[in-house]
Amino acid sequence: MLYLRPMDETEYQQFLDYAITNYAEEKIQAGNYASADAMELSTREYQELLPNGVNTKDSILYMIVENTQNVSVGFVWLMIQQTGRLRYLTLVNILIYEAFRRQGHGTQTLQLIEGKAHALGLERITLHAFGHNREAISLYERVGYKITNVHMAKDVTIQKPHMAY
């Protein structure tokens, strides 16, 4: 069984180091960032979204802990958001460490997040998944998440005009 424990400052710095780098890589792979700008843009986004670290208003940062051995198996970042009158919980970032994958920890963590949403009086959880992350999308669909929006892109080659002489 798992439980969610608030991150301490040391864990937050480890999370931040991983998250900024991983986000930059994901954005490059998705075609959203140029490689040369990725780290700077990723760092800037994280600074804007988490200006006060673990104490950022409406952000909740947890370590995912396996309670029989009391070992961290990953982390999760949740954010309470509001659009109009609708308040909801956004799953911003989740990571199950490689050594603990395919053991049901992702599913259990998503169930724990649902419990947190209920405890906060929120009736909806949203998340974003990069289109190339089929494994995560499959997990989310298995536990009941539905696609609500789809962003698509197509890279095109710019043709140079043919010059007739």
Image: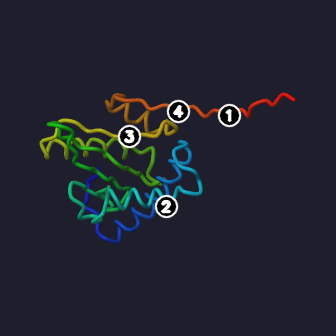
Between the residue at mark 2 and the residue at mark 3, the CA separation in whole angstroms equals 21 Å
Instruction: Give the foreground label among 1 and 3.
Output: 1
Classed neighbour count for the residue bearing mark 3: other residues with Cα under 10 Å, few (<14), some (14–19), many (≥20): few
Q: Is residue 164 left or right of residue 12?
A: right
Between the residue at mark 4 and the residue at mark 2, the CA separation in whole angstroms equals 23 Å
Q: Is residue 4 left or right of residue 71?
A: left
The residue at which mark 1 appears reads as: 157
Quick one: SS at disc 3?
loop
Between the residue at mark 2 and the residue at mark 1, the CA separation in whole angstroms equals 27 Å
The residue at which mark 3 appears reads as: 128
Q: Quadrant of residue 52?
A: bottom left
Instruction: Tell me the kind of residue under disc 3.
Output: His
Mark 4 or mark 3: name the one nearer the start of the chain: 3
Mark 1 or mark 3: name the one nearer the start of the chain: 3
Q: Quadrant of residue 146?
A: top left
The residue at which mark 4 appears reads as: 153
Question: Residue 40 has which mark?
Answer: 2
